[in-house]
Image: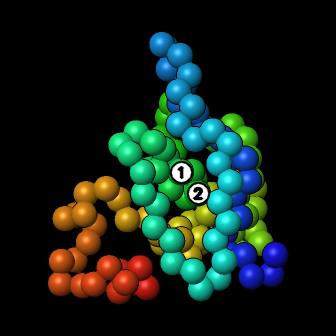
Amino acid sequence: MGDELLNIRGLRTYYFTRVGTMRAVDGVDLHVRKGETVGLVGESGSGKSTLGLSILRLVPPPGRIVGGEILFDGRDLLGLNDKEMLEVRGRRISMIFQDPMASLNPLMRIGDHLIE
């Protein structure tokens, strides 16, 4: 476990609406080792953005993380207060959002973006 940077176990993030519950992320396990570069790909609506927002604890209402565990460098992100999460977001964990023209500099290589 000493080489794991991100360890997600049984993560569940649901959106609660008047028409019912949408299980956007339902029992996801993900393990990323230190030094690994990981890209998350999948069909539209498969939960990629919700997974990223869950890791950053930025799921918008009516969404809510309802279960699971997110450990980042040994710290339980779901147990951190808002101030502690601010120290993690952007400095330790970042998310490239879906609109690449707004998120990515076309003059930089993807690898350079990931390093940045």
Q: Is residue 111 left or right of residue 5?
A: left
- Residue at the limit of the structure toward the right, as seen here: 1
- Residue at the limit of the structure toward the top, as seen here: 19
Quadrant housing the N terminus? bottom right
Mark 2: amino acid = Ile
Residue 81 visible somewhere in the drawing: no
Q: Residue 64's spot in the image, x, y percent?
A: 60, 37
Q: Secondary structure at mark 2?
A: helix
Q: Image quadrant of residue 27?
A: top right
Is disc 2 surrounded by few (<14), some (14 to 19) or many (20+) residues within 10 Å? many
Q: Residue 69's spot in the image, x, y percent?
A: 74, 53
- From mark 2 to mark 1, how far is it between C-alphas? 6 Å
Give 79 or 21, whichever is nearer the viewer. 21
Q: Residue 110's spot in the image, x, y percent?
A: 32, 79
Q: Residue at x 48, y 13 (%)?
A: 19
Q: Secondary structure at mark 1?
A: helix
Which residue matches tag 1? 51
Which residue matches tag 2? 55
Quadrant housing the C terminus? bottom left
Q: Is residue 54 left or right of residue 107?
A: right
Residue 66 visible somewhere in the drawing: yes
Q: Tell me whether circle 2 and circle 1 mark residues in contact (CB < 8 Å).
A: yes
Q: Residue at x 25, y 63 (%)?
A: 100
Give 84 or 55, whichever is nearer the viewer. 55
